[in-house]
């Protein structure tokens, strides 16, 4: 039987330790092709390159036998998936996995995430897709305990499929041991209480650093934030149809055509 073809990408860049870990794990499951940004693209959301040229080249990061085919891309995570599907792959991948992100993409963070946007781009194209994140922002983060959970989720997704219009947002807690297990959750209600740190350059120009605090507005025990806090891996089925279907009837009652 032919091994499943797995497209691997991320937003932290092609040399990121999280990506290298995910590649190693996926090699145990199927045939791996990597298309990832040539530099960090965190927080890019679903941006795509439309007003400048896009470059890609084949690269060799790992030297061992059986190393996967890898391509770096000058664009965003969404660009990487588009380029992979249209120009690099000779057949449709069985699944796309993005990550492992250095840092949380739980709750409202999913909106800004380049990791998840790569997965969403694959999902738009009808490919089962999963974004993986570890809740540790350090470049030297410990990925040694993530293998069991990630391989389990990917194997089950390949066996059962992921419903059309849906991708999985998976976050792994920063712990000193194996996570307690895996919980399917909803996205917690939260936002960022943001501020801009205004400074002045040596030449007298004002510039700003974005800062802020994460504000949890949700005390539910069925959310991704709760699960992570309890030491569980969180899995949130995420849809990219942004229609608020329950509001359509309400807006239809407005006098929209009487002005």
Image (tube, grey):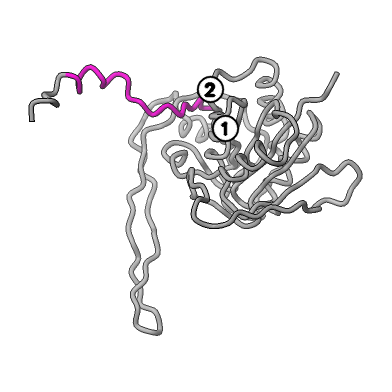
- Mark 1 packing: few (<14 Cα in 10 Å), some, or many (20+)? many
Label for residue 170?
Answer: 1
In the image, what residue occupies the spot 45% across and 42% down? 109
Image x and y of residue 43, in percent = 49, 50
**Residue in front for this viewpoint, 201 or 94:** 94
**Residue in front for this viewpoint, 44 or 235:** 44
In the image, what residue occupies the spot 53% across and 57% down? 52
Q: Is residue 41 left or right of residue 218?
A: right
Q: Which residues are magenta?
A: 232-252
Q: Is residue 248 magenta?
A: yes
In this view, which residue lies farthest toward the right?
65
Element carrying mark 1: strand
| Residue at mark 1 to residue at mark 2: CA–CA distance | 9 Å
Q: Quadrant of the N terminus?
A: top right
Label for residue 218?
Answer: none
From this view, report whether residue 213 is shown above or below residue 245. below
Element carrying mark 2: strand
In this view, which residue lies farthest toward the bottom?
203
Query: Where is mark 2, residue-wise?
Result: 184
Tally the marks: 2
**Residue in front for this viewpoint, 174 or 93:** 93
């Amino acid at each position: 039987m032919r091994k499943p073809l797995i497209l691997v990408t991320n937003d932290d860049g092609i040399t990121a330790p999280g990506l290298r870990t995910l590649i190693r794990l996926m090699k145990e499951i199927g045939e791996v092709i990597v298309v990832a940004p040539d530099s960090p693209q965190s927080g890019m959301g679903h941006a795509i390159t439309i007003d400048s040229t896009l470059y890609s080249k084949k690269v060799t990061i790992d030297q061992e036998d059986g190393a996967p085919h890898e391509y770096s891309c000058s664009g965003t995570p969404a660009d990487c998936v588009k380029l992979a599907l249209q120009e690099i792959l000779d057949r449709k991948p069985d699944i796309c996995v993005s990550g492992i992100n250095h840092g949380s993409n739980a709750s409202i963070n999913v909106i800004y995430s380049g990791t998840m946007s790569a997965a969403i781009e694959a999902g738009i194209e009808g490919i089962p897709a999963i974004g993986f994140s570890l809740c540790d922002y350090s470049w030297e983060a410990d990925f040694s305990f993530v293998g069991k959970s990630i391989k389990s989720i990917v194997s089950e997704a390949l066996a059962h499929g992921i419903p059309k219009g849906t991708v999985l947002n998976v976050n792994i807690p920063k712990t000193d041991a194996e996570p307690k297990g895996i919980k399917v959750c909803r996205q917690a209600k939260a936002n960022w209480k943001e501020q801009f740190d205004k400074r002045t350059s040596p030449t007298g120009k004002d510039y700003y650093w974005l800062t802020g605090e994460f504000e949890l507005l949700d005390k539910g025990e069925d959310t991704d934030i709760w699960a992570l806090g309890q030491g569980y891996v969180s899995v949130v089925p995420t849809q990219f149809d942004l229609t608020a279907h329950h509001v359509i009837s309400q807006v239809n009652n407005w006098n929209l055509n009487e002005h």
